[in-house]
Image (cartoon, helix red, strand yellow):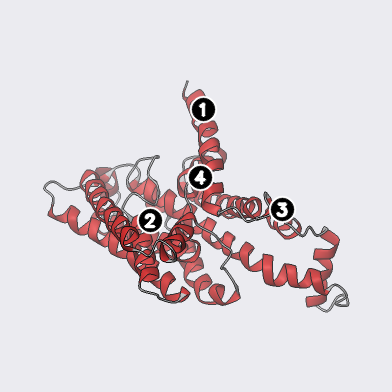
Amino acid sequence: MLSVLCALCLGRYPLSPLRVARVFGSLLHLSPASDPVAQVVVMQARLPRILAALLVGSALSCGGATYQAVFRNPLVSPDLLGVLSGAAFGAALSIVSGASAVMVQMGAFGGGLLAVGTGLLISRTLPGGGILTLLLGGLIGNAIFTALLSLVKYLADPMDQLPAIVNWLLGSLAPSGWQELAWMSGPLIILTVALVLCAPVLDVLSLGDDEARSLGVSVRVMRPALIVLATLACAMTISMAGIIGWIGLLVPHVARLLAGAEHRSMMPVTALLGAAGLVLADTCARSLTTGEVPLGIVTQLFGALAFVLVLRRLRSGVA
């Protein structure tokens, strides 16, 4: 709530909390609409971005926590199975094809799913099985779609299409409006809630395959299902905001420090921390300079610095 209030008040056109309260009061017919400028700034410019940041941050964080539990590796992030490179390839291909903004979002979503599907398919052709095979398949799929992205960037028009691709890859919530929220919010909320409700299964899977089977959990069914849920959530966030790094890797670590390693208590904290963190990051992105800084740059810069502090805290706790 504090992060949302800060985001509503701060920006290149600062507003006092009283003016923001009057805007919502006029919408609820509790006060007269006497501040049209503040109403436009809050309702048309800031509130849609804040809601989008809440959805994207919580979905990315829960997706990252799910990946880390499924692969039993705290350094796993949503780009492990190639969802980021696949979504970037799909969006870049749509931009080069001259597609509309909606089709670019759909291309990013489809590209992310295609990349993860390719990685899972490759893992099935490799000998062995288990987590290591999934990791290898994901790395191969990620490399394939990274190369395809480079090929599309090489073939793109350097005067028009290439800057659009680079701008999209940097990530931003500026295009988020009420129309995008209307068709993206429902699926994102459902996927995020589903990941939070799967916390007991994540606790079992994090123990190991043999322990999970002994407790009655079908690893062959639940692991791919959770990967699909997390991939769908991450792909939708990428199609909505572009590449937003470090949220899915950093926030689950902070949540574990606050709530413990048990996913039943950690996953809700992860969703709230991811939502609040991305709201504050987006506020910094549009407030630091006269021109808006790409959100992906802000999350990578502050995320890397914060991750150093988290690792020092973890190491000191272990010591």
Dot 4, how many residues are within 10 Å of its Cα: few (below 14), some (14-19), or many (20+)?
Answer: some
Of the residues shown, which amino acid type is indicated by label 4? Gln
The first of marks 1 and 4 along the sequence is 4
Q: Nearer the viewer, residue 216 or 45?
A: 45
Real-space Cα distance between discs 3 and 4? 23 Å
Left-right relation of 254 to 195: right
What label sits on residue 312 in the rendered view? 1
The residue tagged with tag 2: helix, strand or loop?
helix
Residue bearing mark 4: 300
Position of residue 140 relative to residue 93, above or below, is above
Viewport quadrant of the N terminus: bottom right
Picture coordinates of residue 262 (x, y %)? 46, 44
Dot 3, how many residues are within 10 Å of its Cα: few (below 14), some (14-19), or many (20+)?
Answer: few
The first of marks 1 and 2 along the sequence is 2
The residue tagged with tag 4: helix, strand or loop?
helix
Residue bearing mark 3: 2
Picture coordinates of residue 284 (x, y %)? 65, 50
Could you tell me if the residues under marks 1 and 4 are in contact, i.e. CB atoms within 8 Å?
A: no
The residue tagged with tag 3: helix, strand or loop?
helix
Quarter of the image holding residue 84?
Answer: bottom left
Q: Is residue 316 visible?
A: yes
Left-right relation of 60 to 139: right
Position of residue 24 relative to residue 315, above or below, is below
Q: Is residue 259 visible?
A: no
The first of marks 4 and 2 along the sequence is 2
Could you tell me if the residues under marks 4 and 2 are in contact, i.e. CB atoms within 8 Å?
A: no
Of the residues shown, which amino acid type is indicated by label 1? Arg
Residue bearing mark 2: 84
Real-space Cα distance between discs 1 and 2? 28 Å
